[in-house]
Amino acid sequence: MRNKIIILLLLLTFSSCSIFKTSQTLTEKKINETATNDKVVSADVYQKFLGDYNLEVIGIPTDYGSLTMKVSRDGDLLKTEYTGESIEAGSSTVIKSTEVEDDILFVEIFVPEYNITGYYELYVEGNEVTGYAFDRFDIVGTKSN
């Protein structure tokens, strides 16, 4: 009887701490579902971020303040790559991953010269893009499809 009470208490403790709950990772396909007139409509949250970006990183201490990049879908994952003249500038940085969280596009960047990793944090409203690079430099630009 004592063992059953201990097991019951352990299960109650673990379940109240959310150890048995599952969560969705950032790299999984995210779909928002909204009910409209008793119909369920799905909208792909990635669609807003797909396209070509022309960005200006303000105050960055290199000559590569302007960059162009393309965000595309590769299956259920997002993929970012430098385009145009930014390919040469991109040789000094490595794009490691691209994720969407809380309606913000995060592009993980590694700079081997300084051995640091940071993010482009991009807010997209229509074709206007704002954000931050490495939480220090402002980003402004546009997005086209």
Image (cartoon, grey):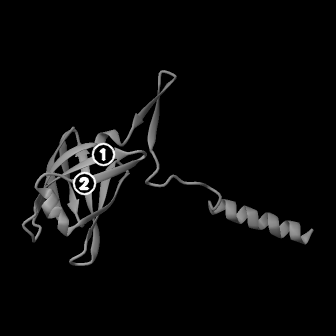
Q: Nearer the viewer, residue 118 or 96?
A: 96
Q: Crowdedness of circle 1 by 10 Å Cα count: few (<14), some, many (20+)?
A: some
Say which amino acid is labelled 1: Ser
Image x and y of residue 10, in percent: 75, 67
Which residue sits furthest top?
37
Q: Crowdedness of circle 2 by 10 Å Cα count: few (<14), some, many (20+)?
A: some
Q: Nearer the viewer, residue 9 or 56?
A: 56
Residue at 10%, 55% in the rendered image: 85
Q: Quadrant of the C terminus?
A: top left
Which residue sits furthest left?
63
Relative to 60, say whether 107 is above or below: above
Residue at 35%, 43% in the rendered image: 46
Image x and y of residue 68, in percent: 15, 52
Residue 81, numbered label: 2
Please count the marks in the image. 2
Image x and y of residue 136, in percent: 20, 68
Residue 72, numbered label: 1
